[in-house]
Amino acid sequence: MFYGEHDHTIDRKGRLIIPSKFREAMKEHYVEKFVVTRGLDQCLFLFPEDEWKAQEQRFRSMPFTKTQSRQFNRLYFAGAVELVCDRQGRILLPQYLKDHAGIQRDVVVVGVSNRVEIWAKDKWKQFFDSTQGSFEEIAEKLWDVE
């Protein structure tokens, strides 16, 4: 549903405009509400409501008797907040989430199929530069079925 990378800027009031292609996909799939939370690799994860519910179900099945499950769920769910786009397609990201991702002003909004990732522009560049050279190697390891 969400594909591509888009450079954007956080405005003076702390709002981020969702890329128009993503807003079109939201309309096509009747998405009105999102959940944003701490993501991995120092970005934010933005899920459509139905995808968030699927993720929540998956993580709820993790055994709470395991320390790592409890720790992950606490950080993941404690950081979560529901968002609705305003009429201009903007969302207001909480400061604690911007702090987690190192977001100040310039961001890259990345579509990753069922979710959107929001990156500080410098962190995205660092991630991209450090991994693009190993793209084929990563693919080979992930699809190696021998």
Image (cartoon, helix red, strand yellow):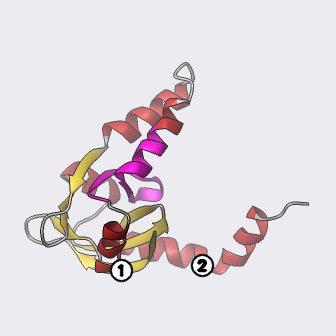
**Three-letter code, disc 1:** His
Q: Secondary structure at mark 1?
A: strand
For the view shown, which residue lies furthest in the right direction? 146
Q: Residue at x 91, y 60 (%)?
A: 146
Which mark, by number, is residue 132?
2
Q: Is 92 within the magenta? A: no
User: Quadrant location of residue 56?
Assistant: top left
In depth, the one of 20 and 8 nearer the eye is: 20
Which mark, by number, is residue 64?
none
Q: Secondary structure at mark 2?
A: helix
Where residue 129 appears, as percent x and y from the top left, is 53, 79
In the image, the segment drawn in magenta is 31-56
Instruction: Assess disc 2: are there few (<14), some (14-19) or many (≥20) residues with their C-alpha within 10 Å of its C-alpha.
Output: few
Where residue 13 appears, as percent x and y from the top left, is 8, 65
Q: Residue at x 32, y 53 (%)?
A: 100
Nearer-N-terminus badge (2/1): 1
User: Quadrant location of residue 120?
Assistant: bottom left
The residues bearing labels 2 and 1 have C-alpha atoms spaced at a distance of 17 Å
Q: Is 32 within the magenta? A: yes
**Three-letter code, disc 2:** Gln
Where residue 143 appears, as percent x and y from the top left, is 78, 65
* Residue under numbered circle 1: 6
